[in-house]
Image: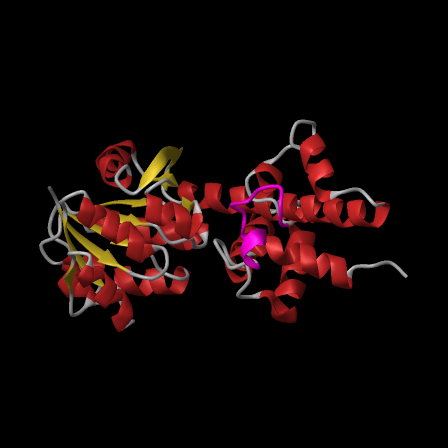
Amino acid sequence: MATIGFIGLGNMGGPMAINLVKAGHQVKGYDLDPSGLERHGAAGGTGAQSIADATRGADVVITMLPAGQHVQQVYTASDGIIAAAAAGALLIDCSTIDVATAREVASAAGGAGLHMVDAPVSGGTVGAEAATLTFMVGGSDEAFAAAQPVLAQMGKTIVHAGGAGNGQAAKICNNMILGVSMIGVSEAFVLAEKLGLDHQKLFDISSTASGQCWSLTTYCPVPGPVPTSPANRDYVPGFSTAMMMKDLLLAQDAATSNGAATPMGERAAELYQAFNDAGGSGKDFSGIVNYLRSNMEKP
């Protein structure tokens, strides 16, 4: 079993680290929030006093951090991961950040003789707890081969997307699809209500017809048709509106930087921003159906 440093023990990182503890690894965790350290310790993990403390002597160092600036700082600071990592250590960043920063940090790690992959995830907190996450991995073939067995103890699907930064590219493209499709499904249910068509009837038809998609069949935005969807729990987030906004804005930044036309992605970002600003930040992103129902009526 490996010695693993895990930095970022929040809603996603916490259960991911616990799954590594359950798999028999020695996991030394660090987080600025004491409650994350307490949960980690209660599950059998070890607490670290600093980023460098979590990193020293580790075979693998994993991070799950909020944004690109945090990843840049945690990895490249004078007391950061790259400076403290043992020779031959594998670095895995599971944060969702911009592609440019992912590539810059990977280059810095490579310059220090360390293998690194960017491995953002899909699956939300439920997937993190159940170890069923999907990992989209960017990095060299050698680094991916080293990371795969570790990632397999936190997830169900691990896909090598290509070189450094390509994991992040895959994540923001995937979540742009998700944001756009959830709005489309939500609009269809709102229209169905106006037309007197029952939610369940629309679901029964569209879930087996050309309208079938994950946003409908797995994460249906209205209560009833899919009992496990957040719509049946007052939109308590599995994936919050704030997190969807982050990913849609990353996609728009990437589109602007690379000259890609993404008009649907742009409009999705605008609508989620409006929902976020109207108080939806802490709700599940599928709750946008309520914003559309209440705010988007034509005169």
Percent x, y of residue 241 = 55, 59
Percent x, y of residue 56 = 11, 58
Q: Quarter of the image for the N terminus: give it.
A: top left
The answer, for residue 207, to whether it is visible in the render is: yes
Quadrant in the picture for residue 161: top left
What range is drawn magenta here?
223-234
Q: Quarter of the image for the C terminus: give it.
A: bottom right
Depth check: 100 or 156 in front? 156
Q: Identify the residue at image location x=73%, y=46%.
A: 189
Depth check: 203 or 99 in front? 203
Seen as rendered, the residue at the extreme right is 299
Depth check: 276 or 60 in front? 276
Using residue 32 as the reference point, say whether residue 121 is left or right of it.
Answer: right
The answer, for residue 253, to whether it is visible in the render is: no
Percent x, y of residue 123 = 43, 45
Using residue 246 as the reference point, say whether residue 294 is left or right of it.
Answer: right
Percent x, y of residue 78 = 21, 67
Q: Identify the residue at image location x=38%, y=51%.
A: 102
Within the magenta stretch, is there residue 272? no
The image shows residue 23, relative to residue 15, as above or below, that is: above
Using residue 138 as the reference point, say whether residue 77 is left or right of it.
Answer: left
Quadrant in the picture for residue 69: bottom left
Q: Identify the residue at image location x=18%, y=62%.
A: 41
Most common SS among magenta residues: loop
The image shows residue 136, relative to residue 35, as above or below, that is: above
Within the magenta stretch, is there residue 231? yes
